Amino acid sequence: MQLESLLLSRDPEVIRLLQPALEKLSIDVEICRGVSSGQEILRTEKFDAVIVDCDDLKGGLDVLASLRKSASNKNSVTFAILNGSTTTQQAFQMGQTLSCRNRFQP
């Protein structure tokens, strides 16, 4: 069984680093660059993991909060990528289940 993940980010560096790393672990990656389109995808599709670039996407925290209310993805493992605007505590309050990391450094 193949694992499925959704990566919500517009940052090319984040996508460049995460996509091959996840694929190397045999995790399919669907990339979405917008919050509203990401929320629509989450309403209609099931993912094992959801990765949200909270500070790159305006409304990223809202995606984490609404994720726990969706029937299909309320149990998905969630990750938040932070870059200083959002705190770790805020991300956990919005339903993130795994530790937050600061944005990747080149």
Image (cartoon, rainbow, N blue to C red):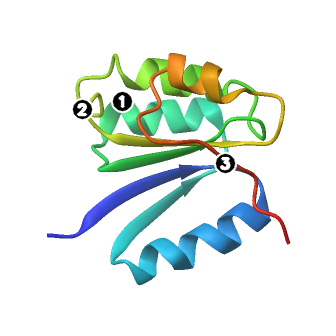
Residue 49 position (above or below residue 13): above
Q: Which residue is mark 2?
A: 72
Q: Residue at x 23, y 24 (%)?
A: 71
Of the residues under marks 1 and 3, which one precedes in the sequence?
A: 3
Residue 13: where, in percent of width, then height?
A: 78, 66
Tell me the crowding category of disc 2: few under 14, some 14 to 19, or many 20 or more residues within 10 angstroms, Cα based.
some
Residue 77 position (above or below residue 21): above
Residue 19: where, in percent of width, then height?
A: 56, 71
Query: What kind of residue is marked 1?
Result: Arg
Instruction: Indicate left or right for 37 with 68 as reference.
Output: right
SS at circle 1: helix
Q: What separation in Å lies between label 1 and label 3 (alpha carbons)?
A: 16 Å
Residue 65: where, in percent of width, then height?
A: 49, 18
Q: Which residue is mark 3?
A: 33
Residue 18 position (above or below residue 23): above
Q: Residue at x 72, y 26 (%)?
A: 87
Of the residues under marks 3 and 2, which one precedes in the sequence?
A: 3
SS at circle 2: loop
Instruction: Indicate left or right for 67 with 74 as reference.
Output: right
Mark carried by residue 43: 1
Instruction: Indicate left or right for 92 with 55 as reference.
Output: left
